[in-house]
Image: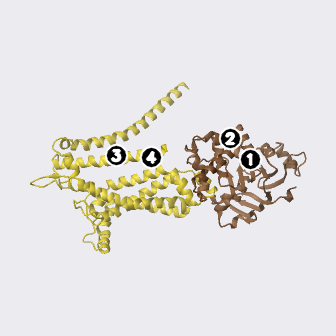
Amino acid sequence: MGNRKQLEIITESAIEWLIRICGISAILFVFGIFFFVFREGAEFLFGGLDLWQFLTSPEWYPTSVSQKRYGVLALMAGTASVTLLSMAIAVPFGLGAAIYVSEFCGPKAKETFKIVIELLAAIPSVVWGFIGLTLMNELIITLFDAPIGLTVLNGGIILALMSVPIIVSIGEDALKAVPDSYREAAEALGSTRWQMIYRVLLPAAKNGLLAAVLLGVARAVGETMAVLMATGHAVKIPGSVLDSVRTLTATIAAELGEAPVASDHYQVLFIIGILLFTITFAVNLIADLVVKGIKEQ
Amino acid sequence: MSDAKKKKIEINNLVVKYEDKTALKGISFDVYENEILGVIGPAQSGKTSMLKVINRTIEFIPEAKAEGVVKVDGEDVMKMKNVYELRRKVGMVFPLPVGLPLSIYDNVAFAPRAAGIRNKTDLDELVERCLKQSALWDEVKDRLDSLGTKLSGGQQQRLTIARALSHQPEILCLDEFSIAVDPVTTMRIEDVLKELRSEMTIILVTNLVQQARRLANRTAFIFNGDLIEIDDNDVIFSEKPAQKMTYDYVNGNFG
């Protein structure tokens, strides 16, 4: 009996440690990645790079023979424009679809929808890029009489299509997590389905819904292959949605292979990585603060 | 004496079936205006199903089917187009308090807002009156902005009652409201119900026989989906109700 007690205590603490290590490893990986990216770019970041010019100049000529210029403003504008457009499309559609799937459609339709949405999420990004490069390209040229269809509009729509499944499936999970008793109590009080949704359900699920939107944003900011293929890859601050742009991610993907290791160009690409890191970190931080703000109300 | 009173709810041969079992096997009775009708009977005897048909919340359970006729103010509820109006007319209090994840104020103002009342002073007045009616006002008047879900169980149940009163129902259905409430709060709510009797019709489903005895004008005894007996409290709780079964149940010989 005494032995068994001993064993229980040992296994218990072993399991506890195992789980603790799993938890800590997640943090370690994030720091590890950040450290690696930072180390590759640190030398040039602290010696040689004019940070102000880096952030405010739209001129990106990393391979110029006479004068190399590393300005990422146009690239940031590219990422921002494509992301904003895609979110403007994906957030209303995604949340609307999540509400529909969770609240309005029957059990059979729900199953079908969820399978289709999961299928949509599983399409590799290069396929989306291909659709952008061919189908959407021609469509935009025909519809808008534009000289080229590889534009902010194209990338935005492609990214929206890629983000919608994420927003729908996570948003639906958030809505599903709201207890049915809330729905029944609200409707028993004589509210219509829609009144119940926007007065009770959405406030109750707002954290989860915000997380859904943010994961959509994160996907849009971080997506590389599809935007590389669909946006035209032109370094330029867009004046309209029918302009071609280039994003931060696409720049790294396209140029890293050709930049000599440890050269200024190579390091600048890693600094762009740090910048992307900072952007996603800021988005998450702001979201956290927003959620906290909502909670305190 | 009952015959002179106006019929508020008429239930005629009501059958409620779930997929594999029958909860109500065809019960019929009337509820009169401004009375408290106690409904007693052991668990699983169909009391809650009956309430749910009256304001059609039975529709939330996809596998439930109701047959027969239930009329509120002479109108067949199953055929009513405006179910929202019906649900505003019939307030419902569930066994476990469900504080909506909103502020105390918004909890009570939810139904009036849904009904289209926007005026701030009207809402303020209504919220205060309902919270006073449910004996909760004094405890929460300084923190109407805090979350309703953070109140204690007994307070939440009174909040639920305030909410049920907020759409000014003509009928108030309480489904074993005291199940999650301490005895002191139960007594306070019972006092509230006695006062409300003059304003509305109350159906009090309870598994506490003594609660029905204390509060109700008449009491119905439902057992296993059948209505065994319905009569004035003087009869049901006397030495000689019409059915021996009623006597046995009321006196704790079974159930």
Q: Which chain is yellow?
A: A
Pointer 1 local density, CA inside 10 Å: few below 14, some 14–19, many at least 20 = many
Give the image quarter of residue B140. top right
Q: Say above or below: A144 vs A209.
A: below
- Front disc: 2 or 1: 1
Mark before the other along the chain sequence, 2 or 1: 2
Name which residue lies at 63% across and 58% down.
A190
**Residue B85, image quadrant:** bottom right
Left or right for A76, reference B196: left
Q: Are marks 1 and 3 on the same chain?
A: no
Q: Which mark is residue B193?
A: 1
Give the CA distance from mark 4 to mark 1.
Answer: 41 Å
Residue topped by disc 4:
A291
Q: Secondary structure at mark 3?
A: helix
Q: Amino acid at mark 3?
A: Phe
- What's the CA distance linking mark 3 and mark 2? 47 Å
Which mark is in front, 1 or 3?
1
**Do discs 2 and 1 belong to a common subunit?**
yes
Q: Say the numbered circle drawn on residue B181.
A: 2
Q: Which mark is residue A281?
A: 3
Q: Is residue B60 left or right of residue A62?
A: right
Corner quadrant of residue A32: top left
Q: Quadrant of the N terminus of chain B?
A: bottom right
Q: Mark 4 vs mark 1: same chain?
A: no
Q: Earlier in the sequence, mark 4 or mark 3?
A: 3
**Numbered tag placed on residue B41 in the rendering:** none
